[in-house]
């Protein structure tokens, strides 16, 4: 599990314990977002430890036995990994936690003028990797069914998700959707001509549905 955590850029290993009592004591002061918790441990089971935790991070249970799955879900764990855990299954659990964390934080992050400050980056899945993409590096995003391609200043990243999902993660004062298939970064726009946006050598169509909103957006921001 330690090796898996170290492979994922979005995870930072705070500490690992082989003694549950030491872990319980440390968790009283440590700032932890995700806890990978084995169920079968000496002196105190993972389930028992979970029950006595007062401040609970997202919990991913690991065990060699499937009998504990129901009890784990009743305790609102984020996921349940059955040993031996493959890296692919591990990544799915991490992705589930990230989606849950995003969903729980949405009331505080509302698109629009009253939105709270957002992080200057997003994490997206590229194959088996989670890649950090800096917002100020993004030129535009292109959607095709369940995939999106993020075009940055240096690379293209293809990720399995819907364009609408990524749109909700991007700050509304810096990005705008101009077409069913395109979201553009305001700072990357070089030219607006008729019904097209030009970003470098690329021209993107402004869809009929988005034309009025885009014009109002540009008039308001003055491309500053």
Image (cartoon, rainbow, N blue to C red):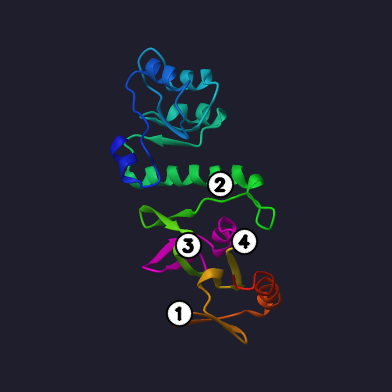
Q: 135 and 68: which one is in front?
A: 135
Task: Spot the residue most to the top.
Answer: 43
SS of the residue at dot 4? loop
In the image, which disc is placed on residue 136? 3
- Which residue bears the numbered disc 2? 102
- Distance from the alpha carbon under mark 4 to that under mark 2: 16 Å
- Which residue bears the numbered disc 4? 172
Label located before the other in sequence (2 or 1): 2
Task: Point out the image quarter for the N terminus.
Answer: top left
Q: Residues within 10 Å of mark 2 (few under 14, many from 20)?
A: few
Q: Residues within 10 Å of mark 3 (few under 14, many from 20)?
A: some
Q: Which residues are magenta?
A: 145-172
Label located before the other in sequence (4 or 2): 2
Residue 106 percent location from the top left of the image: 62, 47
Q: Residue at x 48, y 54 (%)?
A: 122
In the image, which disc is placed on residue 200? 1
- Distance from the alpha carbon under mark 1 to that under mark 3: 15 Å
Q: 167 and 145: which one is in front?
A: 167
- Distance from the alpha carbon under mark 1 to that under mark 4: 22 Å
Placement of 96 over or under 15, stated as above or below: below
């Amino acid at each position: 599990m330690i090796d898996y955590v170290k492979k994922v850029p979005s995870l930072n290993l705070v500490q690992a314990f082989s003694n549950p009592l030491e872990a319980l004591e440390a968790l009283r002061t440590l700032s932890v977002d995700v806890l990978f918790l084995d169920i079968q441990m000496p002196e105190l089971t993972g389930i028992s430890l979970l029950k006595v935790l007062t401040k609970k991070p997202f919990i991913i249970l690991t065990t060699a036995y499937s009998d504990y799955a129901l009890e784990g879900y009743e305790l609102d764990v984020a996921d349940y990994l059955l040993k031996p855990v493959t890296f692919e299954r591990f990544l799915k659990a991490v992705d589930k936690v990230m989606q849950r964390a995003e969903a729980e934080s949405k009331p505080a992050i509302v698109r629009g003028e009253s939105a709270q400050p957002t992080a200057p980056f997003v994490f997206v899945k590229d194959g088996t990797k989670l890649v950090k993409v800096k917002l100020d590096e993004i030129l535009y995003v292109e959607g095709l069914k369940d995939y999106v391609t993020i075009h940055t200043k240096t690379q293209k990243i293809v990720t399995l998700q819907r364009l609408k999902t990524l749109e909700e993660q991007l700050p509304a004062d810096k990005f705008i959707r101009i077409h069913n298939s395109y979201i553009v970064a305001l700072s990357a726009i070089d030219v607006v001509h008729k019904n097209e946006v030009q970003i470098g050598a690329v021209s993107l169509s402004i869809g009929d549905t988005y034309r009025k909103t885009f014009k109002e957006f540009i008039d308001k921001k003055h491309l500053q």
